[in-house]
Amino acid sequence: MTSNLAKEELLQRVKELKFQRILNIDTKSKSINILGCIQDQLAILILEKTAFDLERIDLNHITDYILDGKLIQNNDVFHWYLNTFQQSLETLPSIKTTLIWPASENHIKKYSTQPKRMIVETPDMYERLTQPFILTQRGSQIQWVHNILDHKAESDRIVLEDPDRENGYIILPDLKWDRQNMLAFNVMAISHSHEIASIRDLKPKHLGMLRNLRESVLKKIPTIFPVEASQLKLFVHYPPSYYHFHVHIMHVDHETGEGSAVGRAILLDDIIERLQLLGPEGFASANLTFSVGTQNPLYTIFAGDESHQ
């Protein structure tokens, strides 16, 4: 667990950032990704405005939260204003901040604005192109995942665990969730199995693990958080953001743009259904279609392959 002194140092570190350039602005999520430098090392600062937390706002006195304001325009029954809104670090924070430091070149590409392309990845392309790339993203690249699974880090954030080494998992809040607004509910289940890097490694023998995870989540998560089973959507990404199998669990009303878009997110129910129809090699024998940014290392690999031209 981080000591109080370390926490103060980490809080101060954000303020040390020296601005270099804007990587991305998203008007839908009201976020901005900034590239800067801290202590001569590259850093990425992500600022995102928080959603309204209706469990902490007294709607019967909503106007008490509206502070300074000015009229922009009015026309017939329509009136437009700009206002400041009451905020509190403990109950109504206005911004969620993420710092990536030191930031790698891959981090910078990931959080930069970039056009996307659709890829139809055949089993042959996966074996020749994608699988060798995945091997470079394992080991020390996901040491932070191993630390969580071994309870060496973030153990205080674990909300649910099945310790079985083949079928078990650890569930903890996604760092994108402020843990206050339930409409933005977002947790992640990380498999205890080290043999599954992505959906491509899933075979019929893993159906028991997937069903166990699905049933446990839908049964137990509503006993921990004020959310109904029918309000949960379970899905995986392909390609994933890191190559150790994990499942995203979100509130059905929570839209995350690219994260839950067609071409990236695959529902767990659909994975289970399709896996029952595939042969013994599972998803390694299937075509998978997905979108990828043109700065993603995978796109560079695919673009250089003559069979994909």
Image: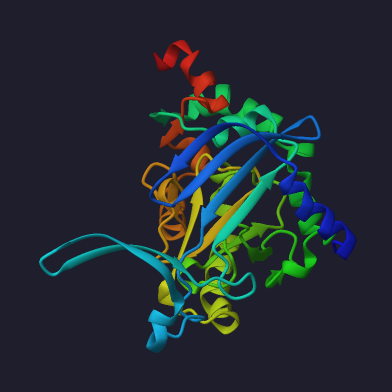
Q: Is residue 134 above or below residue 31?
A: above
Q: Is residue 209 visible?
A: yes
Residue 232 horizontal/vertical position (percent)? 45, 69
> Viewer-proximal residue, 243 or 60?
60
**The N terminus sits in image quarter:** bottom right
Q: Is residue 70 left or right of residue 163?
A: left
Q: Is residue 100 left or right of residue 93?
A: right
Residue 295 horizontal/vertical position (percent)? 52, 25
**The C terminus sits in image quarter:** top left
> Viewer-proximal residue, 78 or 161?
78
What residue sits 54% from the left and 45% below the top? 199
> Viewer-proximal residue, 100 or 70?
70
Asked which quadrant contains residue 212, the reply is bottom right
Which residue is at the far left?
Answer: 76
> Viewer-proximal residue, 13 or 262?
13
Which residue is at the far top?
Answer: 306
Q: In this view, does 289 lie above or below 70?
A: above
Q: In this view, does 38 lie to the left or right of 53?
A: right
Number of numbered discs visible in the structure rendering? 0
Residue 100 horizontal/vertical position (percent)? 69, 43
Q: Is residue 206 visible?
A: no
Residue 110 horizontal/vertical position (percent)? 56, 35
What residue sits 77% from the left and 38% below the top? 139
Which residue is at the far bottom?
Answer: 60
Asked which quadrant contains residue 180, the reply is bottom right
Q: Is residue 113 above or below residue 182?
A: above
